[in-house]
Image (cartoon, rainbow, N blue to C red):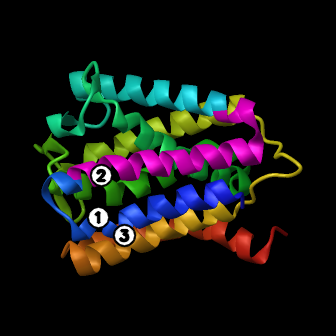
Amino acid sequence: MNTLLIAVLSIAIALQIAYPLVEGESLRVLTLATVYWGAGAMLLHALFAYGARYAFIYLVVTFSFALAIENVGVLTSWPFGEYSYSPDLGFRIFSVPFVVPFAWIMMVHPVLVASRRVAGNWVFLYGGTALAAWDLFLDPLMVASGRWTWVVTGAHVPFQPEIPLSNTFGWLLTGMGLIGILHLILPRDRRKVGASFSAIDIFLVWTLFSGIVGNLFFFDRPGIALFAGGVFGVVLTPYLFTRWLGRP
């Protein structure tokens, strides 16, 4: 991996490690920094592995898609359910904090890379499922820290009574849409000399590991650790299999 990419990815992971150790204003700032550094790491990987055209199109399309669908979600409660963002997430574009699309940027690139490697003609389905599985870790963490709130009137996500089940279906639907669009418009050829898949592997495995360990030992939510960890782990297994054992 490129030295700059290693440095940025290391900072992003270090910020996540510090997350359960701080509170108050420090936690708010750390939350924002974690998203921006994570998005920066994945954008660097996109640039170094696939080139400037890929990185630019990825940034613009993902940011625009996320901003649009999140604004629709806040204003209409579709497709995620009824929710609202806390003012402490900072500057907003219409109804959505500026940082929110960068959370999508942070996660969609590694998911797209994994999906293209293992899913064949079903890249959109695998990618949407992976994003919905990742959100099983993200949403309860952000709700617990007051970054956004939900109105739950019906079924809820298992072990997450504060989050409606509609949110998971919304992530599945929008994830499939965005991954499908990016798969169609982004080049698939990697640069001859560039970043390897190692950064993707590290980021995805760390996301799984930190989600399980954090919920088990720091956030006192073993149900989320087992349920979300199981779902995300099952989704990642085909990709990790091909990375460790090689494609047939």
Q: For residue 237, say whether it is visible.
A: yes
Going from N to C along the chain, the mark reached first, 2 or 3, is 3
Residue at screen point 47% across, 60% down: 11
Percent across and percent down for residue 82 are 18, 34
Residue 17 tag number: 3
Contact between labelled residues 1 and 2, with CB atoms less than 8 Å apart: yes
Work out whether mark 2 precedes mark 1 in sequence or the reverse, and give the earlier one.
1
Count residues near mark 2 (Cα–Cα under 10 Å), then give few for <14, some for 14-19, many for 20+. some
From the viewer's side, name the closer residue of 106 and 152: 106
Residue at position x 76%, y 38% in the image: 51
Q: Is residue 233 above or below residue 178?
A: below
| Among the 4 quarters of the image, the one containing residue 241 | bottom right
User: What residue span does the magenta drawing correspond to?
Assistant: 28-55
Please give the residue where the numbered disc 1 appears in the rendered image.
19
Assign the N terminus to one quadrant of the image: bottom right
* Rendered image quadrant of residue 73: top left
**Amino acid of disc 3:** Ile
Image-based side of 50 in relation to 33, left or right = right
Q: Secondary structure at mark 3?
A: helix
> Magenta part mainly helix, strand or loop?
helix
Mark 1: secondary structure: helix
Rendered view: 208 above or below 144: below
Could you classify mark 1 by the number of other residues whose Cα lies within 10 Å: few (under 14), some (14-19), or many (20 or more)? Answer: some
Residue of label 2: 31
